[in-house]
Image (spheres, rainbow, N blue to C red):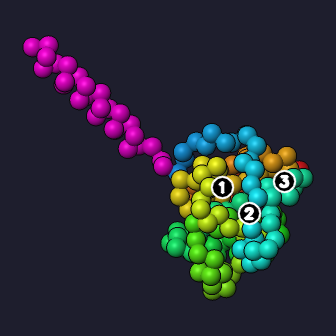
Amino acid sequence: MIRFLLPLAIFIVLVVFLGIGLTLNPRQVPSPLIDKPAPVFQLNHLHDPDKIMMSKDNLGKVWMLNVWASWCVACRDEHPLLVQLAKTGIVPIYGLNYKDERDTALQWLRQYGDPYTVSIVDSDGKVGIDYGVYGVPETYIIDKQGIIRHKHIGPVTVKSLEDKILPLIRELQG
């Protein structure tokens, strides 16, 4: 009898864990990098490959890092909002072009607009891995000391911008 109860008990435990997992929001995956220094990088500019941007270039200012790619359908959804945000000048937006072809990425920005102060190229995805990128788009808010203060998974929406991102940026700029 016990040999039948053990598999049944294991099955019930698995069903409970599956049920709990199905109620979780995948966009709220906690990042182990929150409140830790942003990973160090040195990458070429998308528009001018002879220029290099280093993560330390932004020390002393609050900035947004948006991970995007021309092949990313969800990036198209958030892109008009980023273009609009860039026009306000509230925060500099830097683009991390992730695993993309340079010419295709440049064409995409010409077609949809370029909200980025600078877009840098992560063609092999190593910097994305350092940042813990699950998929594109993802957006990070980094403070004046180079500490990651927020990670937004998926497209930035008006609601996420108004409810979380902009209040945090204003607080950090304070």
Which residue is the site of mark 3? Answer: 56
Mark 1 or mark 2: which comes first in sequence?
2
Mark 3 or mark 1: which comes first in sequence?
3
The residue that appears at 30% across and 27% down in the rendered structure is 13
Q: Examine the residues drawn in magenta and state their main secondary structure.
A: helix
49 left or right of 136 in image: right
Q: Mark 2, mark 3: which one is toward the viewer? A: 2
Task: Tell me the quarter of the image containing the N terminus.
Answer: top left
The answer for how far apart the CA atoms under marks 1 and 2 are is 9 Å
Q: Is residue 129 magenta?
A: no
Q: Which residues are magenta?
A: 1-26
Tell me the element at label 3: helix
Tell me the element at label 2: strand
The residue that appears at 59% across and 59% down in the rendered structure is 125
Above or below 111: residue 158: above
Which residue is the site of mark 1? Answer: 127
Mark 2 or mark 3: which comes first in sequence?
2
The answer for how far apart the CA atoms under marks 3 and 1 are is 14 Å
Q: Is residue 98 in sight in this rendering?
A: no
Tell me the element at label 1: helix
Which residue is the site of mark 2? Answer: 43
Tag 3: amino acid: Lys
Q: Is residue 89 in sight in this rendering?
A: yes
Residue 50: x and y in percent read: 79, 74
